Image: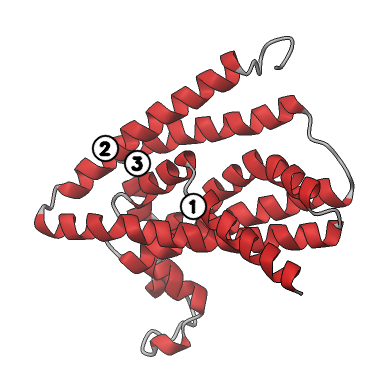
């Protein structure tokens, strides 16, 4: 029993630490840089963590249960997708497209038939959620989390399999790891949004400045990852190191 509790606790806190990887932090910072609601920032972190957990759990479980291996070139291609995604996120933030899609995708309850607008308690939970943060701010972190999960799922699964020999316990560990990642990313996005909200209250232009800074950093990190994967790790070379 003690071993189970120890492994579960370790998995949870390693999942929280995993959320603080540089590419994860830059990606969510780019998404929440214009966010002024601490609650909405936490929800964005939760959706990122859910997307990440879905892929970590599904791909990792397939590797563990079916004893499969991921070709090195495929693994590098998934890492390349993360680099490309960071560049795209940065460009969208720098050009203002991300903010435009956030505003345009805000859920308008008045357009829905058979909605009791006079009583918010009768609104479906998901409608309330989308009204608060907008549809794009639900889908965007979810998709980003899925891409990040694809890039790291094989490494996490192989590390777990080398430590926990029972495949079902190993899958359970992945689930706890995912829950820790969700908690870590929610804490991280809230921590990022607090100073942004305070600074934005004093300077109305601060949101645009923060978004531009996050966009530039995201593009720079994405380009570094793309260069490393393509030319250092040799994704397009004849032989991968």
Classify mark 2: residues with Cα within 10 Å, few (<14), some (14-19) or many (20+).
many
From the image, tell me which residue sits under label 2. 212
From the image, tell me which residue sits under label 3. 97
Residue 90 position in % (x across, y down): 38, 35
Q: Nearer the viewer, residue 234 or 41?
A: 234
Residue 52 position in % (x across, y down): 60, 52
Going 69% across and 40% down the picture, which residue do you hit? 155
In the displayed structure image, the side of residue 63 where residue 14 appears, left or right? left
Q: Which mark is first along the chain, 1 or 3?
A: 3
Residue 91 position in % (x across, y down): 37, 33
In the displayed structure image, the side of residue 202 where residue 163 appears, left or right? right
Does the CB distance between marks 1 and 2 fall below 8 Å?
no
From the image, tell me which residue sits under label 1. 141
Going 21% across and 49% down the picture, which residue do you hit? 207
The quadrant holding residue 79 is top right
> Which residue is most to the top?
238
Res 134 seen here:
no
> Which residue is most to the front?
2
Q: Nearer the viewer, residue 42 or 107?
A: 42
Q: Which mark is first along the chain, 3 or 2?
A: 3
């Amino acid at each position: 029993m003690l071993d189970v509790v120890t492994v579960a606790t370790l998995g949870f806190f390693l999942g929280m630490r995993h959320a603080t990887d540089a590419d994860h932090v830059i990606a969510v910072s780019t998404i929440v840089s214009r966010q002024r609601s601490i609650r909405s920032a936490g929800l964005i972190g939760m959706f990122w963590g859910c997307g990440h957990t879905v892929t970590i759990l599904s791909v990792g479980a397939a590797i563990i249960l079916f004893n499969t291996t991921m070709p090195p070139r495929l693994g590098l291609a998934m890492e390349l997708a993360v680099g490309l995604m960071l560049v795209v996120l940065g460009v969208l933030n720098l050009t203002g497209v991300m903010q435009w899609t956030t505003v345009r995708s805000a859920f308008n309850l008045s357009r829905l038939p058979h909605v009791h607008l006079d009583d918010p308690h009768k609104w479906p939970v998901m409608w309330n959620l989308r009204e608060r943060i907008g549809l794009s701010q639900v889908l965007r972190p979810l998709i980003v989390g899925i891409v990040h999960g694809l890039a790291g799922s094989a490494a996490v699964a192989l590390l777990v399999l080398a430590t926990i020999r029972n495949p079902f316990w190993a899958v359970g560990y992945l689930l706890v790891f995912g829950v820790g990642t969700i908690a870590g990313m929610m804490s991280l996005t809230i921590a990022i949004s607090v100073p942004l909200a305070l600074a934005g209250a004093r300077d109305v232009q601060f949101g645009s400045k923060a978004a531009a800074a996050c966009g530039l950093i995201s593009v720079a990190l994405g380009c570094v990852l793309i260069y490393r994967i393509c030319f250092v790790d040799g994704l397009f070379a004849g032989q991968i190191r």
